[in-house]
Structures are given as structure tokens and as C-alpha cells.
Image (cartoon, rainbow, N blue to C red):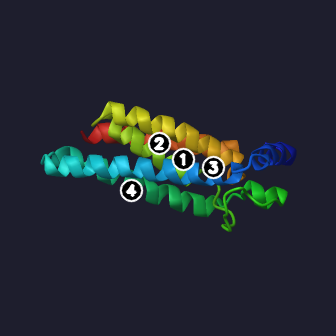
Amino acid sequence: MKKETYQKIMKRIEAFRFGKRIVEVTDMVLTDVAAGFYIYIILMLYLLKRYKVLLPTVLVPAVSLMAVSLFRRLVNAKRPYEVYGFTPLIPKETQGKSFPSRHVFSIFVIGTTLFFVSPSHAVAIWVMGILLAIVRVISGLHFPRDVIAGAGIGIVCGLMTRIFL
């Protein structure tokens, strides 16, 4: 997206009385609810003694997150607010490490991993992932390519869970 597009979107959001706060809270709630679903499923797998399913459900997202974090550090792509010189709607001071979006990656790897355990939870998390991707872009934290890559890599990594089940 171009600088003007970000500015136009952010200006419209800020025109609403609580627009900026809604974006911030939405980002936080989507992230926390997805993490809560994931923790709930892990806890249930443990309590039901489904250890064969539990292990890949924990390890695939964890190892994938470490790999994506290392990749982001190596690529060190700039964020929209760095490139275009504006203040993002969600307070952030991080420099670089924009590609791929780790938030979006995380929610999609969790959703895809959980698909093999609880499809209904997975679909709910994927919907939250789409909303989170939108929020991360309109807030000026990521370029569309960052969130698209994050979602795609998250899905591919999550599919690796199937190999272990």
C-alpha cells in the first residue's frame, strides 16, 4: 500500500470518537482469544491423556515460531510507519522485523494445528486471523505482503502437524 492509502484509512478511523481505541482493543482481543483457545485445547489434550496428539500440537507451533522469528530477524524488513514516516494507530516502536507478520503467522499456525484436533475451533481462529491481518495492516504496523506471508507460512507450518499425527 502507498503512504496516502495508509493515511486515508487511519484518518477515517481516527475520525470516529473511539476509532483508534477500537483498533487497539481489537488487536489485543483477537490475539488473546486465539491464544486462550490454544491453551484450552492443550490443557484438554493433557487432561484427556491424548499425549500422542498433544506433543505435535505444542511442538509444531513452537518450533515454527522460532524459525519465523529467526527469518524475520535476518530479513529485517521495514514497517510501513518506518518507510512512510507516520505514527501507527497501535503504539509500536519496533524497527524492522515486519516480514512476515508474527502475529498473523501465530494465529494461523495455531488454527491449522488445531484443525486436526478441533475443526470448529480452527475455523473460529482462522476467522480471527483474517480480522487480525486486517487490523495489523490498517493500523500501519504491516504491509499487506507481511500478513499474507504470515498467514501462508502459518498454514503450511500447521499442516506439518498432520505428518506427526
Q: Looking at the image, which is closer to me, 143 or 132?
A: 132
Choose top left, top right, bottom left or bottom right for residue 165: top left
Q: Report the residue marked by disc 4.
A: 63
State if disc 1 and disc 3 touch (CB < 8 Å): no
Mark 1 residue type: Val
Which residue corresponds to the image point at 83% horizontal and 60% vertical from the top-left?
Answer: 85
Q: Say what secondary structure mark 3 lies in.
A: helix
Contact between marks 1 and 2 (CB within 8 A): the answer is: yes
Left or right of 65, for residue 77: right
Q: In the displayed structure, does residue 87 sit left or right of residue 29?
A: right
Q: Is 14 left, or right, of 115 in this rendering? A: right
Q: Which residue is mark 1?
A: 104
The residue under label 3 is 22
Q: Label 1 vs label 2: CA separation?
A: 6 Å
Q: Is residue 33 left or right of residue 119?
A: right
Q: Residues within 10 Å of mark 2 (few under 14, many from 20)?
A: many
**Distance Cα–Cα, label 2 vs label 3:** 22 Å
In the image, which is nearer the foreground, mark 1 or mark 4? 1
Mark 3–mark 4 contact, CB under 8 Å?
A: no
Type of the residue with mark 4:
Val
The residue identified by callout 2 is 108
- Mark-to-mark CA distance, 2 and 4: 14 Å
| Secondary structure of residue under mark 2 | helix
Picture coordinates of residue 59, whole percent (x, y): 31, 53
